[in-house]
Amino acid sequence: MRPIVPVLLLALSLVACGGEQEKKPRAVPLVEVQPITLAAFTDNLEAVGTALANEQVVLSAPVTERIEALNFSDGGYVAKGQVIARLAVGQEQAELASAEATALQATQQLQRIQALKSRGFATGATLEQQVALANAARANAQLARASIGDRVIRAPFSGWVSLRTVSPGAIVTAGTAIATVSDISRIKLDFTIPETRLAMIREGMTIKAVSAAWPDRPFNGAIATIDPVIDPATRAVRVRAILPNPDKALKPGMLLTVSVIARQRQSLSVPELALVGDGDDRFVFVIQDRTAKRVKVETGIRQDGRVEILGGLKAGRKVVTEGVVKLTDGVTVRLPGDKADTKPRDGSGKAAG
C-alpha cells in the first residue's frame, strides 16, 4: 500500500504543471476614448415656492343683515367696481329720508336767519347756532348714505370670483365671507433660499418654475423682489418672482419647483463615465501611445451627463470613457479598430519578448 502514495503525489504534480501551462496570457483591454472638450455649465439654484394671486381679497359683510341679491356666478369674472352683493337697506333708507328732511329744514331756517341778520333783526349768536344745526343735519344725512353704501359690496379690482357659499335671503353676521376675488392674470411666486446663496441672485434674473399639474410645461418669469430681511430662525431669505399667467393655468396655492439660472460659463468637461473615485480624490485615464495614464483632476458641477473639469487636464487630450474598470495606471489598451492582441506589453506599448 505504501508505494501508491508517491505515485499519487507525482500524478498530482503533473496535473498542476499541465494546468499552469494551459493558462493563456491576459488580453489587452478594449476601451473607448473621447477628447476633452468645452461645454456650457450653469449654476442653478433649486427651491420650492408657493403661487399667490397678483391681488386677492375676501369680501365680507360689514354688518349683520339679510342678503337681498348676489350678482356673480361661481368662478365667474367680475370687473372693477361691479356690484357683488346687496344687503337689505329698508331701515337705512328710512333713516336717510328722515335725515335729509331734517337737513332741508335746517338749511331753510338758516337762510331765514341770515336774511334777518342782514336787516339787523337777528343776533350773531342765533346765526351761529343755526349754522351748527344745519351742518349737523347734513352730517346725519351723509351718515345715512354711507350706511346704505356699506350694504352694497363691490369688487375692488377685476378678477375671478370663488365658489358661492351663501345664498340670497340668508342673514349674515358682520365679517361673514361672501366672495373671494382673485386677480390671476399674473402670479406671484414666493420661495426661500439660504443666505449663503444670496450673492448669486439679483432682481430681474430669469427663473423657471414647474408645477405637478403641468409637469411638461415650464413657466418662465423673473425675480421681482428680494426681501431685505433674513429670517433669523431659518437663515433664509424670501424671494418673490412674477410669472405671466394669460391662460390661468397657474392657480393660487399651487406648489412649484423653482430653478434660478444664476451663472453660465464654458468649461472643460469629460463624460461622467470617465471619472474614477478614490476616497475624496477623482481621476481619469488619459491615453497616450496606447498607454493609459491615471491623472488626478479637480472637478466642478455635473450637468447633462458631463463633469466640469477645473484643473488637471488640458483641452484635446483623450480620456477613457468605456472600459475604465479594466484599467490600472500604465496598462496598455486597445482601441476600437485595433487588431486583437493578447501579448503583454511594456510601458512603451511594444510586445514583450
Image (cartoon, rainbow, N blue to C red):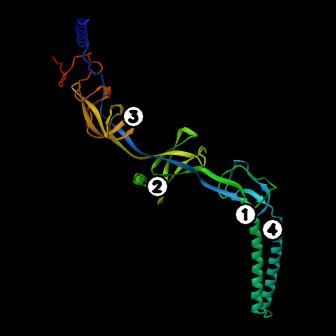
Give how far across and how far down residue 56 sits, in percent. Answer: 63, 55
Q: Mark 2 touching mark 3, by CB under 8 A?
A: no
Q: Which amino acid lies under the numbered mark 2 shown in the image of this protein? A: Ala
Q: Residues within 10 Å of mark 2 (few under 14, many from 20)?
A: some
Label 1 SS: loop
Residue 86 found in image quarter = bottom right
Q: Earlier in the sequence, mark 4 or mark 1?
A: 1
Label 2 SS: strand
Q: Earlier in the sequence, mark 2 or mark 4?
A: 4
- Closer mark to the observer between disc 3 and disc 1: 3
In the picture of the structure, the residue carrying the numbered disc 1 is: 62
Give how far across and how far down residue 333 sits, in percent. Answer: 26, 23
**Label placed on residue 217:** none
Label 3 SS: loop
Depicted 53 relative to depicted 345: above or below:
below
**Label placed on residue 305:** 3
Q: Residues within 10 Å of mark 3 (few under 14, many from 20)?
A: few
Q: Which amino acid lies under the numbered mark 4 shown in the image of this protein? A: Glu
**Label placed on residue 92:** 4
Q: CA distance from mark 2 to mark 4?
A: 53 Å
Q: Residues within 10 Å of mark 1 (few under 14, many from 20)?
A: some
Label 4 SS: helix
- Closer mark to the observer between disc 2 and disc 4: 2
Q: CA distance from mark 2 to mark 3?
A: 31 Å
Q: Which amino acid lies under the numbered mark 3 shown in the image of this protein? A: Gly
Q: Mark 1 touching mark 2, by CB under 8 A?
A: no
Give how far across and how far down residue 351 sits, in percent. Answer: 18, 18
In the picture of the structure, the residue carrying the numbered disc 2 is: 236
